[in-house]
Amino acid sequence: MNTLPIAPLFARIVDDLATHGWSQQTIFIPTDLTTELAKECHKRAQCGELEPAAIGRGEAKIVHENIRGDHIQWLEAGDHHAVDRYLALIEQLRVAINQTLFLGLEDFESHFALYPPGAFYAKHLDRFRDDDRRVVSCVAYLNEQWLPGQGGELRMYLEDERIYDVAPQAGTLMVFMSAQWPHEVLPATRDRLSITGWFRRRA
Ligand code: OGA
Ligand code: MN
């Protein structure tokens, strides 16, 4: 087998996942890339390409703003060079996780998400009742100069309901085991942009 050494940034994430089941990185995405991705997300929002997010899947899929109020658009490879740059980073992470943790992660699905002021996502797990393909969740934040009073934290419910809040600051990447940690998105006073995605295993 031909395996390359894992770069330190990816190795740290893999290590954290193995020991805690989650990892927070504050400099995962270069500044020029978050700026470009934020610009692209805003542009798509202005063109009306983002749609109210639904919960559940297939027949059970339904829009419920009292559960989740973000607007999303699924990403496609080849859509935009900044999106491709992000997906290339994520691909390196997928390979690093598989090399070490043997989770059999096969692909990655992701979407832009824009939470307008006041929108939130109530406490949930990232796993559908009828589909357990999502194994690892990855959220990349795109908001420059997020200030403490602006809300919009990702609130993680860790062991013993220990609360851990993550500010959606540009450059931060939050990675966690999808079936393990309940979490919610708190309302913010400004638009809150991210790319949310999931590494999936074979059905
Ligand atoms: C989700 C989610 C977290 C965030 O989309 O499932 O939990 O911080 N997002 O945007
Ligand atoms: Mn979630």
Image (cartoon, rainbow, N blue to C red):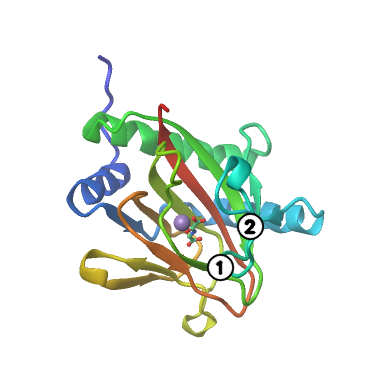
Identify the residue position indicated by label 2 in the image: 38
Q: Which mark, residue 144?
A: 1
Q: Nearer the viewer, residue 127 or 86?
A: 127
In the displayed structure, 18 sits above or below 194; it is: above
* Residue at image location 61% in from the left, 48% down from the top: 61
- On screen, residue 98 versus residue 27, left or right, reads left
Q: Nearer the viewer, residue 185 or 39?
A: 185
* Residue at image location 50% in from the left, 85% down from the top: 149
What amino acid type should be assigned to the residue bearing mark 1?
Glu
In the displayed structure, 132 sits above or below 19; it is: above
Kind of element beneath mark 2: helix
- On screen, residue 89 versus residue 53, left or right, reads left
Q: Quadrant of residue 192?
A: bottom right
Measured as percent of width and height from the top left, residue 112 is found at: 61, 51
Q: Quadrant of residue 53?
A: bottom right
Q: Nearer the viewer, residue 203 or 120?
A: 203
Which quadrant would the C terminus be assigned to in this image?
top left
In the displayed structure, 101 sits above or below 33; it is: above
* Residue at image location 72% in from the left, 53% down from the top: 50
What amino acid type should be assigned to the residue bearing mark 2?
Ala
Mark 2 residue crowding within 10 angstroms, few (<14) / some (14–19) / many (20+)? many
Q: Nearer the viewer, residue 160 or 44?
A: 160
- On screen, residue 66 versus residue 129, left or right, reads right
Measured as percent of width and height from the top left, residue 58 is found at: 60, 40
Kind of element beneath mark 1: loop
Q: Is mark 1 within 8 Å of ligand 1?
A: no
Mark 1 residue crowding within 10 angstroms, few (<14) / some (14–19) / many (20+)? some
Residue farthest left in this picture: 19
In the displayed structure, 79 sits above or below 160; it is: above
* Residue at image location 22% in from the left, 33% down from the top: 100
